[in-house]
Image (cartoon, rainbow, N blue to C red):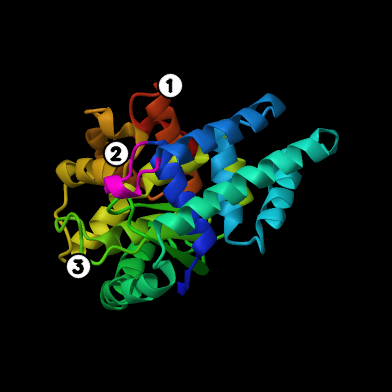
Amino acid sequence: MELSWRICRATSAWHWAISVARGRVANRQAADPAVAELLSRLELLVVPLGVTADRWWQHVLSLASQSKSPDDLVHRLLTSLTRPEDRTPTLEVQLLDGIQRVEAAFARTFPRFDQEMPMRIAPLQAQWETFGPGLVRQLVHRVGADVLAECAELLLVPPVVGGAGTAHWRSNRVHFEAVLTNPHPELPEVVRLVWLLAQLDLDRPVFREANSGDRLPDLGALAMIPPVIESAAELGLCERGPETIGDALRYWDLPQRHQPEMPDVLRSWWETFTNFRPSWAIGLVALERMLSGVRPDAASDIGDFL
């Protein structure tokens, strides 16, 4: 996998602001209550247009790195998410004002962003150069080369949460907190990074046609945990087993982290997958049915397709 690295101020601003609004900021000095209020106002502008808050912020994070200015970001967001008749001058002005206020608040909170961020690249790059290629090779052995993207862009952002990242699978980008050390040594950040990168090619028709489009991002994130953990364990980076899967669910902040049965469900699904070795698309179908309660075990679903 060819990986390009970039520090992105716009993505950093929105990663910070959304983390503040969700109460995830580790450093209280970086938690600006006014920003949370700004984001609530922006949501009120778009929700009446049929755009959910989660979908809106996903697109903001995804498009920020591609936008040349706040005006350009507004244009891209409205073009992607709304109908032409909904794009009124008043709405555009209100969105632009809110976006400019958030980015100005970020600049005040992180006045040394341009000086400090370049120093944060080296530790993560060292982890990647040491373990990244080996992790990818191990993962390809387990899920197949056709599942992973050939190239990706890594957007580095400040560690406001203390270890976090998101896969933007429609644009082959990952934004990732540039932590200086591993917050959880038993599951190093390079493992989280490979897990995110492994999700990037899910927008291909072979996956979208076989699985529910709305659930596909969450499904792909869950499915990649067992093979990534296995790959990392092979290199001595972590332990195998449901305990480590549970750690990944918590440390990587997945919604299913509060479901005590989830580590065993994923382990059972992965064992069945490795026994049958179906395509990744069929494996995802089986996992979706297990999680929805349609079928209690993956073997029944995978066997139906073979």
The residue under label 2 is 266
Mark 1 highlights which residue? 294
Is label 3 in a helix, a strand or a loop?
Answer: loop
The answer to whether the residue labelled 3 contacts the one labelled 1, judged by CB atoms less than 8 Å apart, is no
Q: In x, y percent, where is residue 127?
A: 27, 72
CA neighbours of label 3 inside 10 A, class few (<14), some (14 to 19), many (20+): few
Circles 2 and 3, Cβ within 8 Å, touching? The answer is: no
N-terminal label among 2 and 1: 2
Q: Of callouts 3 and 1, which one flags the residue occurring earlier in the amino acid sequence?
A: 3
For marks 3 and 1, give the CA distance: 36 Å
Q: Does dot 2 land on a helix, a strand or a loop?
A: helix
- Who's the residue at 54% across and 44% down the image? 58
Q: Residue at x 28, y 77 (%)?
A: 126
Residue at the image point whose x is 68% and y is 47% from the top: 96
Circle 1 — which element? loop
Looking at the figure, which quarter contains the N terminus?
bottom left
Which of the numbered marks, if any, corresponds to residue 235?
A: 3
- Residue 135: quarter of image: bottom left
Q: Amino acid at mark 3?
A: Leu
